[in-house]
Amino acid sequence: MRRLTGAAAAQQRVTTSLMEIFHESFYVSDYIPPLRHHFLTRFYDPVVRLTTRERVFKHALLVQAQIKPGQEVLDLGCGTGTLTIQIARAFPGVIATGIDADPEALAIARAKAVREVTPVTFTRGFAQHLPFDSGRFDTVVSSLFFHHLTRTDKKSALAEAGRVLKPAGELHVADWGRPANALMHAAFFMVRLLDGFETTAESVSDGLLELMRAAGFAGIAKTAVVNTPFGSIGIYRAIKPI
């Protein structure tokens, strides 16, 4: 085969690079990256920080969770690990584990944990098939994850969350919920455009509450709403029956 040189070789490199970017950006894999497209993952942390009032809603989530020393906590769909690390730092003695399907997001999470000298564990896996024993965790938390899942996968993920929780264990979720007003409804259109109208359908109607109930949880409640520039984030709670 003839080896390309000069301008032809340069053109081939450019063409190959563009094809790789296209493939990485729009290829539908078996998981959805944090900002829908792989090439945006590196920007996830600043985007979330600037657009979601991250400190406010995550503080509300952790105040609600009331995690105790010695407990095991699972961060479901941990992404780049911000919440997992925050839990380990806020509740000394807690055993914090984050799980996500995206290897690039996990690489960022592990680097952050090393940089911040925080003892956490990050595992690659899918929320629909958790690689953990039944009844292992005291608490499962999740932040801006469920709106990435189809309704079927939401059901599977909630069933798995219930399986890995101990009896009376608690599930605490922060995610896009029913818009608090017309302005929030209009703002949420941009999130739906980016993350998909199918996967965010339950968000508009607070359908996560119904799905939690169908998964066998008790004590189900939406306890708070945080309005952001891109819609309303709901804080949800559910308890695994004894």
Image (cartoon, rainbow, N blue to C red):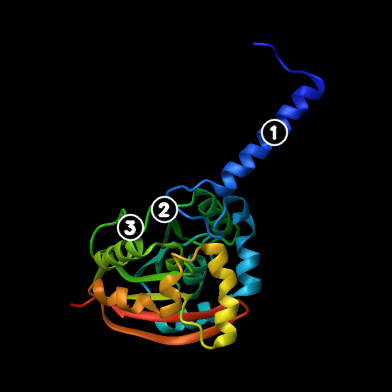
Question: Could you classify mark 3 by the number of other residues whose Cα lies within 10 Å: few (under 14), some (14-19), or many (20 or more)?
Answer: some
Q: Quadrant of residue 115?
A: bottom right
Q: Position of residue 17 (x, y in %)?
A: 67, 36
Q: Position of residue 241 (x, y in %)?
A: 20, 78
Q: Is residue 168 above or below residue 20?
A: below
Camera-near label (1 vs 2) is 1
Q: Which residue is mark 3?
A: 128
Q: Report the front residue among 53 and 201.
A: 201
Q: Quadrant of the C terminus?
A: bottom left
Q: Residue at x 81, y 24 (%)?
A: 7
Give the CA distance from mark 3 to mark 1. Answer: 37 Å
Camera-near label (3 vs 2) is 3
Task: Report the number of numbered marks.
Answer: 3
- Between discs 1 and 2, the one toward the N terminus: 1
Q: Is residue 93 visible?
A: no
Q: Which residue is mark 1?
A: 15
Relative to 111, is 170 on the left or the right? left
Q: Which residue is mark 2?
A: 123
Q: Amino acid at mark 2?
A: Thr
Camera-near label (3 vs 1) is 1
Q: Amino acid at mark 3?
A: Gln
Question: Could you classify mark 1 by the number of other residues whose Cα lies within 10 Å: few (under 14), some (14-19), or many (20 or more)?
Answer: few
Whether the residues at callouts 3 and 2 have beta carbons within 8 Å, the answer is no
Question: Could you classify mark 2 by the number of other residues whose Cα lies within 10 Å: few (under 14), some (14-19), or many (20 or more)?
Answer: some
Q: Quadrant of residue 194?
A: bottom right
